[in-house]
Image: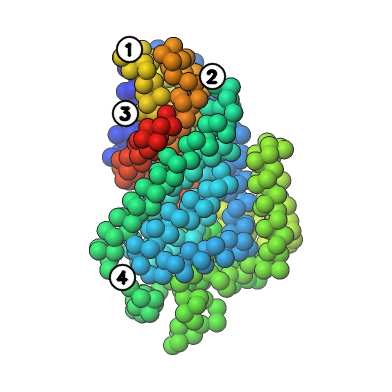
Amino acid sequence: MLTLLGFAMIATFLVLIMLKKMSPIAALVLIPALFCVCVGKGAELGDYVLDGVTGLAPTAAMLMFAIVYFGVMIDVGLFDPVVRGILKFCRADPLRIVVGTAVLAAIVSLDGDGSTTFMITVSAMYPLYKRLRMSLVVMTGVAAMANGVMNTLPWGGPTARAATALKLDASDIFVPMIPALAMGLLFVLALSYVLGRRERKRLGVLTLDEVLVEETEKEPATETETVLVGAGSGAGGAAKGAGAGGPAAGTGPGSGARPAGGSEESGPPEDDAFQGLDPHRATLRPRLYWFNALLTVALLTAMIMEWLPIPVLFLLGAALALTVNYPHMPDQKARIAAHAENVLNVSGMVFAAAVFTGVLQGTGMVDHMATWLVDNIPTGLGPHMAVVTGVLSIPLTYFMSNDGFYFGILPVLAEAGQAHGVPAVEVARASIVGQPLHMSSPLVPAVYVLVGMAKVEFGDHTRFVVKWAALTSLVVLGAAVLFGIV
């Protein structure tokens, strides 16, 4: 009974958000509460929710301060050189822009944090997609899939969890999987090329001059439009000013308005015309560039080496970045206010997801669902348990957290495989192939950073990305089988 109710709860949630009958926050809270009552454990709902909130509170804290930290780094111009390089490659060609989105997301994913990847990628690419009227779900889908493949890095989480759960060395899991993961990344790039050609066919190819002329013929951007893509908050910010006494933050080319120094007749210089991030924004701190770069490297190094808990690292990093870059209190308040909308949206989603996961785990639904799946694996598939694990990882890591899958399900699958002579390390390798789809799971807090900053409905993102992300996972699994890795 719990198995059936568990699947029914997940299906109800997905259907309602994809049909836009409920907002994700409302669905994450109300649907599990209703099913908890149906299970007959309504009196224990409070305990389940508190357990879920307690488990996700460190994640929420990490995301809150990570958004502030990387938001400030975007404000001060730390990532501008990378953004300029990608945008120089993209120009005004929709095909190049989509491929550039995948490349940028993959590069930034090397830090192992999905939220960071999505903040930087969306901040850089959102103005281009908006200006050319490209599909924003293409941007979110491509970024999520590229990050999903790169999320298998040993410091990204899933590989470390698999190694810990089965008492293996993370390098024994990851290194042999590199060829298969490379094929997955190549598939994402190829898919980006196809999606980019489709966007190019729909919109055509514009030169920079044509885009600028078209912009001047439009009505001036409204305050809301200017705020959306203003400097300092990327695509999802809410800042109206760059700080005390500074010019408006949303007056750069990314917002469709004139940058400082450009006249109405002559227009902005071509070098600054298509930057995405306003190169004249008052929040820039060019003299502190190397300090910010070293601080970010030190922060990421401390995170990888696990010198301190990640939430503590980002809390300290955000405080230090604000103090050094904006020593005046009004400027600090302005930067915090600029990123407050993203912080509130993401933390709200995380705590709402805590209700969903708390009910799933507290009522025992997730355990019954996993047991049912494992018990229904045909005996004849025992010698192929690695492949079975790879196939199961695709839906299971979408419907449950990585912790639930790697610490709850993977040991059972590995034990079943060993009974048929399948090494545990092969089962562990196969278990990470579902990550391209996992990164778009409603239980992954980072995905709310992605859709929130891109101003995309979560249901629209889900409808678009699920089929392509699942196919990417199957490509990785097929390559692993072809190369004899699993």
Element under disc 2: helix
Name the residue: 44% across, 36% down: 435
| Residues tagged 4 and 1 counted as in contact (Cβ below 8 A) | no
State whether residue 384 is above or below residue 209: above
Q: Is disc 4 surrounded by few (<14), some (14 to 19) or many (20+) residues within 10 Å?
A: some
Residue reaching furthest to the left: 201
Q: What residue type is labelled 4?
A: Val
Disc with the residue nearer the chain's start (2 vs 4): 2
For disc 4, the marked residue is 205
Identify which residue, 268 or 356, lies in the foreground: 268
Label 1 packing within 10 angstroms: few (<14), some (14-19), many (20+): few
Q: Residue at x 49, y 60 (%)?
A: 124
In the rendered structure, find residue 47 and report the number of the disc placed on it.
2
Which residue is rendered at x = 49% and y = 81% of the image?
A: 269
Which secondary structure, mark 1?
Answer: helix
Q: Nearer the viewer, mark 4 or mark 1?
A: 1
Against 9, is 335 above or below?
below
Precedes in sequence: disc 3 or disc 1:
3
Question: Is 314 drawn above or below residue 76 in the view shown?
Answer: above
Around disc 2, counting alpha carbons within 10 Å, would you say few (fewer than 14), some (14 to 19), or many (20 or more)? few
Contact between labelled residues 3 and 2, with CB atoms less than 8 Å apart: no
Mark 1 or mark 2: which is in front?
1
Q: Can residue 279 be seen in this view?
A: yes
Instruction: Please give the residue where the numbered disc 3 appears in the rendered image.
Output: 11
Q: How far apart in space, not on screen, are marks 4 and 3 (Cα)?
A: 41 Å
Q: In this view, does 434 lie to the left or right of 44?
A: left
Q: Position of residue 343 (x, y in %)?
A: 55, 47
The front one of 225 and 293 is 293
Which amino acid lies under the numbered mark 1 shown in the image of this protein? Thr
Q: Which residue lies furthest to the bottom in this view?
A: 265
**What's the CA distance linking mark 4 and mark 1?**
55 Å
